[in-house]
Amino acid sequence: MQRYFTPRCLGLHAIMLVLLPAFTWLTLWQLDRALGGNVLSWAYVVLWPLFGLYAIYLWWQLIHDEPSRPGAEMLASDGHGATDRPTPPSPSAAEGDRPPGWALTGGRKRNVAIAAAHPIDAESGGRGERFRAQTPDEAAQLEQYNRYLATLAAEDSAEETR
């Protein structure tokens, strides 16, 4: 019950209190126009309620989403960053059994590939993706990819200065 009253969720509730009446008003407005002879308005009579249902779906998903922050589980353990880290997989693990060991972060302009060695969401019992420790080959690929991203960023900034 506590999750429904966080600042993030209260903001989502406020957005829904604005969107749903607006979508209802737009549906009724388009219905009035459609009954007045505007054939195109019949499409909007169907679309605005669908937008409302999609907004409800997104609201529900965002309310029940568990945002993760890097290092959140380390801070939650004892407040000083000491935590039991998972052990790296054994070298005999098949490559097909390994989930991805790195992902992109940083936004459009500053993409940086990162590697994680612990579950993203440990509190919900492993809900979400789990990462294993990097292999030396993955580390080399990661470094090569970061160099590629740096080259793209340099080209992009050179284009912006022209």
Image: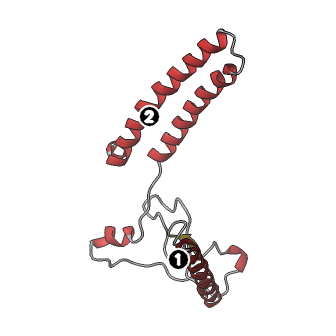
Q: Residue furthest front?
A: 162
Identity of the amino acid at label 1?
A: Ile
Tell me what residue is drawn at x 50 percent, y 78 percent: 117
Q: Residue furthest left?
A: 79
Quarter of the image for residue 29 reads top right
Identity of the amino acid at label 2?
A: Met
Q: Name the N-terminal-most of marks 1 and 2.
A: 2
Asked if residue 46 is positioned above or below residue 88 in the image, the reply reads above
The spot of residue 14 in percent (x, y) is 37, 36
Q: Quadrant of the N terminus?
A: top left
The spot of residue 136 in percent (x, y) is 61, 90
Q: Which sits in the foreground, 21 or 128?
A: 21
Q: Residue furthest top?
A: 36
The spot of residue 151 in percent (x, y) is 60, 82
Q: Which sits in the foreground, 139 or 98?
A: 139
Disc assigned to residue 114:
1
Q: Secondary structure at mark 2?
A: helix
Which residue in the structure is indicated by mark 2? 16
Query: Are discs 1 and 2 less than 8 Å apart at CB?
Result: no
The spot of residue 80 in percent (x, y) is 27, 76
